[in-house]
Image (cartoon, rainbow, N blue to C red):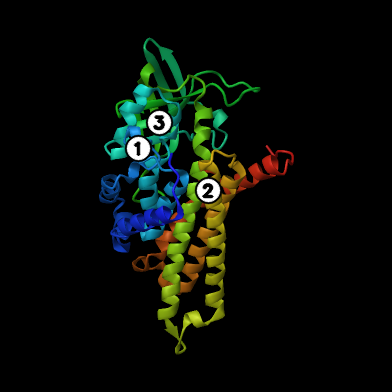
Amino acid sequence: MTTTDASDLELIRKTVRELARKYDWDYWREKDKTHEYPWEFVKAFADGGWLGAMIPEEYGGIGLGLTEAGVMMQEIAGSGAGMSGGSAIHFYVFPPAPIVRHASEEMKQRVLPKIASGELLMAFGVTEPTAGVDTSRITTKATKVDGGWVINGQKVWITNAQNAHKILLLARTSPRTEDKPLAGMTLFYADMDRSKITIREIDKLGRAAIDSNELFIDGLEVADTDVVGEVDKGFYYLLDGLNPERTVVGLEGIGLGKAALDLASQYAKDRRVFDRPIGQNQAVAHPLADSWIRLEAAEMVAMNAARLFDENKACGPESAAAKFLGAEAGFEACDRALSTFGGYAYAKEYHVERLWREVRLLRNAPFSQEMVLNYVSSQVLKLPRAY
């Protein structure tokens, strides 16, 4: 991982912004309408080397830190791409973290260069319909056989499954125990074998260009060489990716909020009612100004969390706060933009309704605002746990 000074960070921001904005508002409106994966956008970032942002250089990446990757993702979300573009790139950058940190050297050499180049699209299979945020309760099971494992179970809300070549899959390899409920799970780098995995796409509110799916796994075979790290330690490997993901989700929310704020501010200057621009009215201007302040504050918290991570310092509460504030400030900015546009906000040609639909996801995922508050109240304030 490299460190980047302020001028280099600004160069990254400028370069990513220019690349992302080659794909305009109409491009993303059409992708949302047709539910078509944005392969052209992904290829542009692959050609620029950005898909391997946090993959070490020896495996084909550029070895940047979370600060730089976070800025990249903020600019993508803020370009008008929203979470359709954000998720398309996000899943090349962050799910590979357990492979980078814990896989065998053979697996790293085999897998990471293909992810960095965009040759390989990987899904990430953790969530289950009956477990929710209590990952210890997953029921997908891997049974040991000669030379490998056979996996059976179900996953839900799995991004990219329609097109993915591989899936990083969490399954139980030992029974759950009350004293160590999070032990006994293993990460597998598995083929997305459609003869063994039934995939059903979920029709959803937003981010329509990027598929979300239910998976039904029946007899999926995985070789011993495709176990990531050690058997039974898979959940602990996932923890390495939680703080970066939370920080970046916050920054993506901030990017979305700033994009909506730009649209609303321009509309408030151009739209005239009663012979004056509507932005002259404080009832319009003040909410937008308030959102600018909140987005700036949320960005400072998120960048501090990224800095702590890059310095190998504890950053759990800061990352949780970054996710919370970015999701809240981003949604509020999009909601206020919706109000600024009035009735025209409902017209897809003005684009703001798509940002509003997409940013709402971030209050729920990757973990809800209520779970952030549970974490901070118990881990930071040392209050009794509610669950």
> What kind of element bears circle 2?
helix
**Disc assigned to residue 103:** none
Quadrant (top left, top right, bottom left, bottom right) of the C terminus: top right
Q: Does residue 179 appear left or right of residue 71 in this picture?
A: right
Residue furthest toward the top?
146
Is mark 3 in CB contact (under 8 Å) with mark 1? no
Q: What's under tag 1, amino acid-wise?
A: Ala
First of labels 1, 2 by sequence position: 1
Q: Does residue 255 appear left or right of residue 197 in this picture?
A: right
Residue 377: percent from left, percent from top: 69, 44
Residue 129 visible at all: no
Residue 380: percent from left, percent from top: 69, 43
- Which residue is under mark 3? 168
Residue furthest toward the bottom?
275
Q: Which residue shows up at 48% across the image and 19% down it?
A: 231
Q: Does residue 204 appear left or right of residue 319 in this picture?
A: left
Q: Which residue shows up at 43% across the image and 84% down it?
A: 272
Q: What's under tag 3, amino acid-wise?
A: Leu
**Disc assigned to residue 364:** 2
| Gap in angstroms between the C-alphas marked 3 and 2 | 22 Å
- Which residue is under mark 1? 161
Q: Which residue shows up at 74% across the image and 39% down it?
A: 384
Residue 376: percent from left, percent from top: 66, 44
Q: Is 155 or 286 nearer to us in this picture?
A: 286
Question: Is 303 rendered above or below residue 93?
Answer: below
Question: Is 33 rendered above or below residue 217?
Answer: below
Quadrant (top left, top right, bottom left, bottom right) of the N terminus: top left
Residue 29: percent from left, percent from top: 32, 60
